[in-house]
Every structure is written in structure tokens, then in C-alpha cells.
Amino acid sequence: MQHQKISHSNLIDIEWARIAPDKVVVATKKRAWLCHPSSIKSDRFSQPIEGAGNIATTRKLLDGAIAAAKYAVNTDVRPPALTATRWVWRLASQYHLTCSASQIMEEAAKGFAANNKELLTEWALEKAEEEKGHDLLALKDIQSLGYDAKAVVKKLFPPAAMALMDYFTRSAQAEDPIDSAGYAYTIERLSLGISEEYIQKVENLFPPKTNATRCLRVHSSVGADANHVDENVSMISQLTSAERCRIARACYETALMCFSPPTEGYISDKELRQILEPLKIIDVSVGKNRSYLTRIKSNIENNFQHS
């Protein structure tokens, strides 16, 4: 019996993608599920899909890949409780995740252009523009907590953030930078889980009128990322089936890094306080060293305006 390639003319409103050697995510307009296809040719999900995508099924496909990663990690390890000290660590992560994002996306755009992929080139250039200045928001947040922001990000390199940036960089510099689209979708999709309620919990860690959530708000459900996710899905649904499958796999790989606890364990608040103590530039409660803080603030704002 001769086997035919499976296309959307045979199966309406369904997509699937192999995200790991033994894992395939299958998606319809309403749901997504994980299956473990056999090597038998009659197993339809073991065969590459062909044909166009659509916004509804492509969204479920990518979200299904992210959910599969969370299920795969399945750890009982929980991060330490969020404290004012640990928030500085989180801000350092936000800085490292954003400081080179625009430049890396520009590199991806060059790769897409070299491969004559106009839609992806335009998308990457738009992403590069959107990400400009977000690292400065993280610096302002750190500064608002009374630390020398630039000194902090030179001292703190959260392993999870560095692993993600390494993956993003390698994806963008590849001959075909398509995995960078999966990385971008995953990071922005996960940010939608950050609600106004969570932001308020972070703000409650600090004295009134302390503004240390600028960067968080931008990358949350109340920021621009909600629209970005919709735009990403719309673009990805127009790509070839092979490209959509690659992006789904990249979503899975990126999400694995996001959900996995650090192999070396979480840094303690005590260790963080020891690192951060020499980097304080102001006692926020009494206003010491205000002139130095003002000078730092002016420098950051000038850089932001000219970025």
C-alpha cells in the first residue's frame, strides 16, 4: 500500500509538530495534546504535516509545546519566597534578558533576509525596535531600590537568564534563525501569566511610592506583550508547515529552560545581601547620597532618550 503525504485537505483544522524524538504535540482549534507516535508509517502523527496553518490551531500548537515542557519538568522544587532582596536578583535577570535582545533580533533579521524570508525579516526588525530601551527600565528599577544599578548587573548573572540568552543568541546566529521566533513567542507568552495582582504583590515588598516594577509591567499581561503574542501567532500561522514545526520545537526547548530549577540550587537571600551590601548608593528611608543618585538617574534617562 502506498502512503500519501498528509495535508490539511485530508485533516481539517489540525496541526502537529515533533518537539522531541518521542513527543509530538497535536492541536485543533479548541485543544492540544501530547502523543508518542510509533515509527509505523500508518501512524499519521509520525509523518510531517503539510499545508497552511491558521491562527487558532497554530496558537494551540505553540501553547501546547510550552505546556508539554512544563509537564516534562514536573519538579517538586519550588523557588524561594519573593523578598525585596530577591527582587533585585529578578531585576538583574530582566536586565540580562533585555540588554542585547534588540541587537540579537537584528542579527536574526539579517539571517532571514539572506534566506529571502520577507515576512520573518519584517517581523524580526519590528521585534528589534520593540525591545529597545527595556534594559534601561530594569536599571531604573534597581536604582529605585537604592543600588548602583550598573554595578549590580555586572555582579549578578542569574544562570537561568544567561542560559536563555545563550540559546537566543545561537538561534539568531544560525544559518536559518527560525528558532528565534520560538524563543520570542515563549518569553512573551509566559509573560501573560504576570497579572496586575502579582505586580501589586511585588510592589508591596517596598516602601510606598517606590517604583521598581517598570520592566515587569512592560513584560506582563497589562503591558504590550499581550498584543505581541497575538501578532506573533498571526505571523507564524502564515509560515510553511516545516517552519511552524521548528518554531513549536523551539518553544518547547525554551520553555524547558524557563521551567527547570537551577541545577546548582537557588541562591540564598543571605548570599544576595552579602553581594548587594557594598553596592548600595542610598538609604532610601533617609535620603542619603541623594546627589549621587540624581546623577545616576540623569545618566540613565539620557541614555534612554537617545537609544
Image: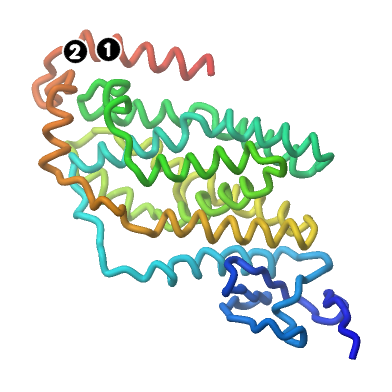
| Residue 261 position within the rendered picture, expressed as x and y whole percent measured from the top left | 32, 57
At which x and y percent is residue 158? 32, 40
User: Disc 1 on helix, strand or loop?
Assistant: helix
Q: Amino acid at mark 2?
A: Arg
In the rendered view, tell whether residue 160 sits above or below residue 300.
below
Q: Horizontal placement of 277 versus 137: left or right? A: left
Q: Are marks 1 and 2 in contact (CB under 8 Å)?
A: yes
196 above or below 119? below
Where residue 215 sits: x, y (%)?
40, 37
Residue labelled with disc 2: 290
Residue at mark 1 to residue at mark 2: CA–CA distance: 6 Å
Q: Which residue is drawn at the image coordinates 81% and 42% (left, top)?
A: 117
Tally of numbered tags = 2
> What's the residue type where badge 1 is placed?
Thr
Q: Residue at x 18, y 22 (%)?
A: 279
Q: Find residue 42 and report its image quarter.
A: bottom right
Q: Which residue is mark 1?
A: 294
Q: Is residue 19 left or right of residue 201?
A: right
Q: Residues within 10 Å of mark 1 (few under 14, many from 20)?
A: few
**Vertically, is 204 above or below 290?**
below
Look at 63% across and 77% down and name the residue there: 30
